[in-house]
Image (cartoon, rainbow, N blue to C red):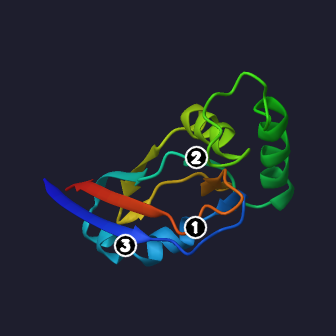
Amino acid sequence: MHFIQKEIQLRPYARGFHLITSEVLEHFPDLSAITTGQLQVFIKHTSASLTINENADPTVRMDFESHFNQMIPENATYYKHTYEGPDDMPAHIKASVLGSSIQIPITNGKPNLGTWQGIYLCEHRDYGGSRRLVLTAWGI
């Protein structure tokens, strides 16, 4: 069994859903050493998240943002955690709904994603800044 781990820092992204598949793979060329295994991508933040979804049509990412803003609105009267602005508590909830990590099979040194799948950084803050990811791959 072979284990590889690397921490990377993404450039800051605007609020919304962003394809980061190529950026992740660009920072992790060691993935090619694994024939069969798993890749875990973990985000070290509580107001941004990761998911896998449509990688071709950008309106899918726009619809994600619109839907999550309707489903988890800012300025809800019952929020107690409001010290960091109106986007903060909704960002925490959105991050918990979507999750902080994803796992992808590795086949012949590459992530075995579907034709239309890509890794999304889900930035839930207006000014979230750069985000740190831990990339862990294991296999044979």
Question: Is 115 displayed left or right of 72 in the figure?
Answer: left
- At label 2, which amino acid type do we have? Thr
Q: Residue at x 65, y 68 (%)?
A: 13
Observer-nearest residue: 77 or 140? 77
Which element is circle 3 on? loop
Is there CB contact under 8 Å for labels 2 and 3?
no
Q: Earlier in the sequence, mark 2 or mark 3?
A: 3
In the rendering, which numbered label is found on residue 103? none
Inspect this view and state whether residue 86 appears.
Answer: yes
Q: CA distance from mark 2 to mark 3?
A: 18 Å
Question: Is 120 displayed left or right of 17 in the figure?
Answer: left
Q: Earlier in the sequence, mark 2 or mark 1?
A: 2
Q: Residue 134, relative to residue 9: is it above or below?
A: above
Q: CA distance from mark 2 to mark 1?
A: 19 Å
Question: Is 113 displayed left or right of 72 in the figure?
Answer: left
Residue 109: x %, y % from top left = 35, 66
Q: Residue at x 50, y 45 (%)?
A: 46
Observer-nearest residue: 12 or 115? 12
Residue 53: x %, y % from top left = 66, 48
Q: Residues within 10 Å of mark 2 (few under 14, many from 20)?
A: some
Q: Which residue is mark 3?
A: 28
Image depth: mark 2 or mark 1 in front: 1
Disc count in the image? 3
Q: Residue 29, relative to residue 55: is it above or below?
A: below
Direction front: furthest residue: 83
Question: Is 112 displayed left or right of 19 in the figure?
Answer: left
Is there CB contact under 8 Å for labels 2 and 1?
no
Direction top: furthest residue: 78
Please tell me in which quadrant of the rendered image residue 35 appears.
Answer: bottom left
Image depth: mark 1 or mark 3 in front: 1
Q: Which residue is mark 1?
A: 129
Q: CA distance from mark 1 to mark 3?
A: 22 Å
